[in-house]
Image (tube, rainbow, N blue to C red):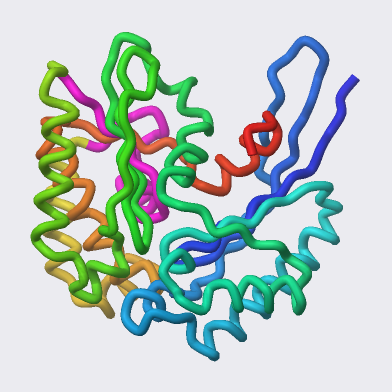
Amino acid sequence: MIKIKRYAAIDIGSNAMRLLIVNIVEQEGKEPQFNKSSLVRVPIRLGQDAFTVGEISEENLERMCDAMKAFNLLMKVHKVERYMAFATSAMREAYNAKEVVALIKKKADIKIEIIDGKKEAAIIASTDLHHLLKTDQTYLFVDVGGGSTEFTLFSNGKMINSRSFKAGTVRLLNDMVCDVVWDEIEKWIKTNTEEYEEVILIGSGGNINKLFKMSGKIQEKPLSYIYMNSQYAFLNSLSYEQRISELGLNPDRADVIIPATRIYLNAMKWSGARNIYVPKIGLSDGIVKAMYYGKI
């Protein structure tokens, strides 16, 4: 007999907000299946506020409330039985975050939890990564967000180390990542990967998903360092307007895709990785799975 549960995850990032609705198919004697029912992405760049002026602006607060009301209605229509809403880097740093959380609870009846970088990395890592990790290999998992980037090292199927750095795409766009941060990232990656002969990168985040889609490759195939490097040069050769009109990128993707590519390239260079795999996983997928398996 088949039983279907419907869970939802809300990811309030620095570049965009997402609502993911998932059908969880349970069948006796089989692993549960997680099937995406709906994904809605709203480009509210909270990081632009939080990282430059330290608070979420009135205008973005209003947009956020509207989006959350819409998310609530969508969950109702889909008959979602359980949801969780997590906010990351931008909300961590906005000094009016508590007021924002309270207002959204009051106006949209959605409870938001602000999580730190370590919890964010752990939730993402609790997705389907164990299916991807070959036990005899070493992987550096890189999740690039608008406000921060999470690095997690796996070897022999186990998590070795994890660290979150304040180097995200929105910060880079605003020239807010100093050389010291880059040096720290380089040192962390080199120190943690030096004892391993070969390291493979796993990329997560909207930008690497977009780069992968643009490559036209099939899901199991990786992107090479050479491809990433040429893509970086190609994207840089186009103006912001050309990236929208010629490549069909969303306006809120066309600018952040360049700094994101730079982070992945540096991670590959410093770890010596020749390839990057791009499974379709992210914080919202992780939230649903962590909820289902009772981890959060």
Q: Residue at x 45, y 52 (%)?
A: 116
Q: Residue at x 70, y 34 (%)?
A: 292
| Pick the front one: 114 or 152 | 114
| Residue 268 against residue 179 in the figure, above or below | above
Q: How many marks?
A: 0
Can residue 211 be seen in the rendering of this structure? Answer: no
Q: Give the left or right position of residue 261, taking residue 89 as reference.
A: left
Query: x, y percentage for residue 178?
Result: 13, 65
| Pick the front one: 43 or 138 | 138
Is residue 286 found inside the magenta-colored segment of the image?
A: no
Can residue 176 be seen in the rendering of this structure? Answer: yes
Q: Give the left or right position of residue 183, taking residue 280 as reference.
A: left
Which residues make up the magenta segment?
Answer: 198-223
Q: Give the left or right position of residue 113, taking residue 31 as reference.
A: left
In what quadrant of the picture does the C terminus appear?
Answer: top right
Query: x, y percentage for residue 229?
Result: 12, 48
| Pick the front one: 157 or 53 | 53
**In the image, farthest residue toward the right:** 1
Q: Residue at x 39, y 16 (%)?
A: 157
Query: x, y percentage for residue 130?
Result: 47, 21
**In the image, farthest residue toward the bottom:** 58
| Residue 261 against residue 119 in the figure, above or below | below
* Quarter location, residue 243: bottom left
In what quadrant of the picture does the N terminus appear?
Answer: top right
Query: x, y percentage for residue 165?
Result: 28, 52
Q: Residue at x 31, y 41 (%)?
A: 163
| Residue 228 against residue 174 in the figure, above or below | above
Is residue 213 found inside the magenta-colored segment of the image?
A: yes
Q: Give the left or right position of residue 232, taking residue 108 as reference.
A: left
